[in-house]
């Protein structure tokens, strides 16, 4: 998963400040256990995503309780930027594999939301980072940690490198189905515990609290059509969803 740079405490291996990938399973956090390889239906995928929701992860529960330092949040912001700035490419990978024009238009709307207007979503993320004291720019972001590189390469393989539309959509959906709720909780925690109140620092989260509800619902509908049209793609889609989770 995306993790901040190595830290001296046990958090170093356990933080997933990320977008959809969590660390390897541990006995303590049994919700991280991998999904069953027989997962093939959209209903099974929905259940698995809910069961291992990102807000159950110890990094996010610590954020919700105000237990993380601002320095940790700044490290997280620098690492997550690499995923956020590449996310439009992952949407584009799924877009390119869709055969129906009406389905492509749905993904195109997602792309337009991501980077078709100013400020773009990556720019809004930088506004958040600056709101908590980070001082890097889009031209010179912090170097990605190994886990961050792994996350980005995984999503690239699952979307841009996908051979079918359904697995690529599954990878996007596994992320966006959770992120509206995650965004709202992050914003709440920032206000409640960290004194972060500037509107610009919360705009990324406000936008995604609305946008990702719409995106995930639209992606789910397209994914359902793909699975009905090509039932044989179910296992590969289930594996793609599983891979986004660790």
Image (spheres, grey):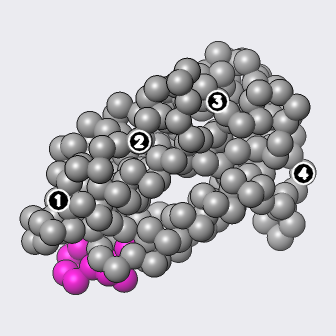
Mark 1 — residue?
224
Label 4 neighbourhood size at 10 Å, few (<14), some (14-19), many (20+)? some
Secondary structure under tag 4 reads loop
Q: In this view, does 56 lie above or below 107?
A: above
Measure the alpha-carbon separation of dots 1 and 4.
43 Å
Q: As drawn, is 96 to the left or to the right of 152?
A: left
State the residue at coordinates (84%, 58%). Answer: 142
Which of discs 1 and 4 lies nearer the camera? The answer is 1
* Location of residue 232 by image quarter: bottom left
Dot placed on the residue nearer the N-terminal end, 3 or 4: 3
Foreground tag (3 vs 2): 2
On residue 34, the disc is 2
Name the quadrant containing residue 111.
Answer: bottom left
Image location of residue 8, percent across then percent down: 88, 31
Q: Position of residue 18 (x, y in %)?
A: 60, 45
Residue located beneath label 3 in the image: 59
Q: What stretch is highlighted in magenta?
A: 94-104
In this view, the residue in front, 123 or 141, is 141
User: Observer-nearest residue: 193 or 197?
Assistant: 193
- Which residue sits at x=83%, y=70%? 139
Q: Which of marks 3 and 1 is nearer the N terminus?
A: 3
**Discs 1/2, front:** 2
On the image, numbered disc 4 is attached to which residue?
Answer: 135
* Mark count: 4
């Amino acid at each position: 998963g995306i993790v901040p740079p190595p830290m001296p405490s046990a958090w170093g291996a356990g933080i997933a400040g990320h977008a959809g990938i969590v660390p390897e399973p541990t006995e303590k956090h049994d919700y991280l256990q991998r999904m069953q390889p027989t997962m093939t239906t959209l209903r099974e995928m929905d259940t698995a995503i809910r069961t291992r929701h990102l807000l159950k992860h110890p990094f996010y529960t610590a954020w919700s309780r105000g237990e993380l330092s601002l320095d940790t949040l700044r490290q997280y912001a620098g690492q997550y930027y690499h995923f956020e700035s590449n996310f439009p490419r992952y949407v584009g990978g799924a877009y390119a594999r869709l055969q129906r024009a009406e389905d492509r238009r749905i993904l195109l709307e997602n792309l337009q939301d991501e980077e078709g207007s100013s400020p773009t979503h990556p720019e809004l993320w930088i506004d958040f980072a600056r709101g908590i004291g980070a001082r890097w720019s889009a031209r010179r972001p912090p170097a990605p940690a190994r886990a961050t590189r792994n996350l980005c390469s995984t999503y690239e393989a699952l979307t841009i490198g996908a051979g079918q539309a359904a697995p690529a959509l599954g990878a996007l959906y596994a992320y966006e189905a959770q992120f509206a709720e995650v965004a709202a909780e992050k914003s709440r925690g920032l206000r409640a515990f960290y004194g972060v109140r500037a509107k610009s620092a919360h705009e990324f989260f406000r936008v995604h609290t609305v946008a990702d509800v719409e995106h995930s619902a639209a992606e789910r509908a397209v994914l359902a059509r793909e699975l009905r049209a090509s039932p044989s793609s179910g296992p590969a889609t289930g594996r793609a969803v599983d891979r986004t989770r660790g």
